[in-house]
Image (tube, rainbow, N blue to C red):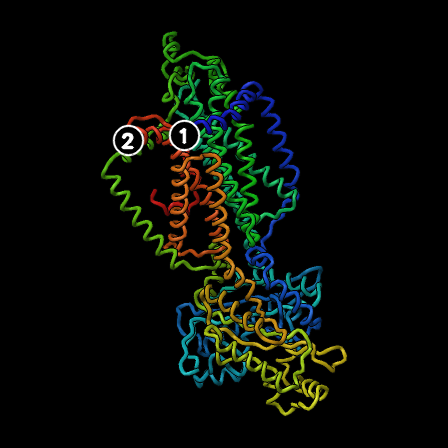
Amino acid sequence: MSITTFYRHHEERLGRVFEIYGRLVSRYPMVIIFVCLLVNCLLFGLGILNLESETDTEVLYTPRGARVYNDKMDLDKIFTDKSDSNFYPRGIIGLNKECHVIVQTKNGSNILTPSYLEEIKRVDTFVRNISQTKNATISAFSDVCALRNGACVVSGDFLFTENFKKHLLAKNITFPVFSRSIISTNFGDVRSSNGTLEFSSMVFLRYYLRQNTIEASMKSADWERAFVDAMETFDSAMVSVAYSASISKDEELSKNISGDLKFFCLTILIMLVYATCATSGGNCVSERQNLGRASVLATCLAIASSLGLLSALGVKYVEIAGIMPFLVLGIGLDDMFILMSCLADAEVKSSIEERIMHAMRTGGVAITITSVTDFLAFAIGATSVFLGVQNFCLFTGTAIIFCYLNQLAFFMPCMVINERRIAARRHCGTCLRTKSRPELITEGHSKCFAVCCGGEPPKIRSDNEGFLESFPKRVLQKALTNAVFKVCAIILFIGYIAASVYGCVNLKEGLLLSNIVDKSSYYHTYAKLIEDHFSIEVPVAFTFTSPQEYQDPLIQRKIIDMLATARRDPLVNSDIEINWLSDYRASAYYKGTNESEFVSGVQHFLSVRPDHTNDVILDVTGTEIVASRFYVISNDVTSTTDQGEMMINVRRIADNFELPVTAYSYWFFDFEQFAAILPNTLKTMGIAIVVICVMTILFMPHPFLIACVTVTMTTILLGVCGFMYYWDMTLSTVTMIQLIMCIGFSVDSSAHMCHAFITVEGNTRAARVNAAIEAGWELRSSMRRSPLLSASPF
């Protein structure tokens, strides 16, 4: 037995299962439709009222189980200050409640002038005067601001000191450290020379809010919303402002979710119109437009059922899942075209039951292969360590399964009902019995009446094919058998592979915040300025979480050596170190004879150096240092690859140190993604490719099919990854989702076309190609592809 013969026998065995179902659905279509609608409605109603969304970017895009979560939890237990009068930004372990303002010169000129400084002061005054009223209580910034020595904490307020004004006029502002404070992150578009700041076109101000109690945190959140509303009204002839609050990312993501609804409704309308147009072309009896609309309805029911079921199971909706309906609608229409094509191939003179059985025997296997491969791709993607990717894949994979089931339990019964209508010669709109057009004209009716009301069952396949179905495949049949087109295709493909490889080598990693919110959002403007014009210099705290003998010279030397090792890293600033121990030793309060005197000296030292207050934690008796921390600052790590590498390097230094120490920065919540995205993507894609190849072997055990599917899938993934570089995209959790989609979708078209080429009859290769295109064109796989898949020229 030849391989082809074995393959056909294997397909026949699979087809018999669907043939049995075809007999059942042809006999009881209304019962099956009723059960399908009942189940879908129950699933939707079961959980839709419990639908919750997750918009916290930290939760969505930081890997689950990441080390940064445990580090933050451990440090929070130690460095927790419940007072409201001892705040230091770098002393806070987690993300702060804060509001940001970027002041930018409108013409791009130097902002380091007295006149611009006065305008910056006007912006600062405007912010400080913002107030909000709740429960008849008015809260201004002074009522919600974090305090330091009784004054509100504002990063950048050094601009308004007499010391800065004096150095501004003298043009000798030291940079990046000014008056023992790091100011490099407060200026954008910086030019400096010999340690002196010469030019900057924008200034960054941070307003820190109180959060020492639940009540204070709630009041701060209310003031943040008043801040966002008020900043929209600020106007200046000299400067423009961009702004953000700690609530901005989550709220703007929530707006994205609500904004998806109108696009979803528009997509349904477009799909209805397309399905109607693509299935039209017959007469009023053989017309199939109702089937096109039934397929869209079946898909919409699947989407609703998946949302309801997963919501009932407690899975939170994520913003990126907003593209799920668009994908599933394309998949549903693709299955519709396959089933309708298989029905059209059945003998016209056969009974309805035989025709439906034929359609299920051939089409059932086809849509099962595509649905299973798509589902498996998303099922494997659901194992991702990123919650955003996981939940998207859960929603989409579940919707694909429901879409498949609805095609069998809703669309197929609708096909049976439509076939019964055609056999009874009933009008597609009125369901009234009608006559053929020639008969109506013979009876004296007008041609217009005959066209609108007359019709007859189709006699051959082409009677039902519209222009959108027949024209494209005719063009392809001509092109693919033309020698010139083949040569051009090969040349284009070689160029495509070369460009893809180059793009993959140069592809960057990381998620840009400006890409996850609407471009009209105020947060998009703010995020773009941060990404393009400000340096990213990250403070890293080396924290000792257990008591140490700090008075011991040997311990002191080890700590100094550890920090020196960190500063020798090429990604860490070699000149800046925040070290309370070194500053204490250099002070007049230093006492190193024994622990009690050492701690007593530390207490006196901290009274005159409050900037180190949150870096040293004493026990309740004040006689022992239970924890402390030291800081280094990274260089400007704008590359996400460097950011992930820097995090890994400082952690390695801490892990290799002989004393228990933790390297931590709140920036690591972002950097964890950059360090994990590439290995996680490669792992997920690798597993998906292997599993889908195994499924291909099970469904289509033919070496040629397996080789073609694997090569096609690999080249499409290569092209998508490579062309992301040319589209100025990065490898992130969002584009990782696109790659997962590509795996399933790239299998569909290649599997169907190869399957058609193997099974069709033909004496020559050209004849088999034409027959394969004829049989496989109804895939409409282009409808199912994400925009990224347009990278492939085929």
Which residue is the extreme one toward the bottom?
588
Instruction: Confirm or deny contact between disc 2 and disc 1 (CB under 8 A).
Output: no
Q: Estimate the x, y position of residue 654 in percent, counting from the top left.
A: 57, 73
Which residue is the extreme one toward the left?
484
Q: Quadrant of residue 765?
A: top left
Q: Amino acid at mark 2?
A: Ala
Specify the quadrant that holds the C terminus.
top left
Q: Is residue 428 above or below residue 523?
A: above
Q: Amino acid at mark 1?
A: Ala
Residue pointed to by mark 1: 278
Task: Decide which of 216, 675 is in the foreground and name it.
Answer: 675
Residue pointed to by mark 2: 766
Q: Residues within 10 Å of mark 2 (few under 14, many from 20)?
A: some
Q: Estimate the x, y position of residue 59 in percent, counting from the top left.
A: 59, 57
Q: Nearer the viewer, mark 2 or mark 1?
A: 2
Find numbered disc 2 in the image and state the secondary structure of the residue it sits on.
Answer: helix
Q: Estimate the x, y position of residue 6 in percent, counting from the top left.
A: 43, 29
Mark 2 vs 1, N-terminal side: 1
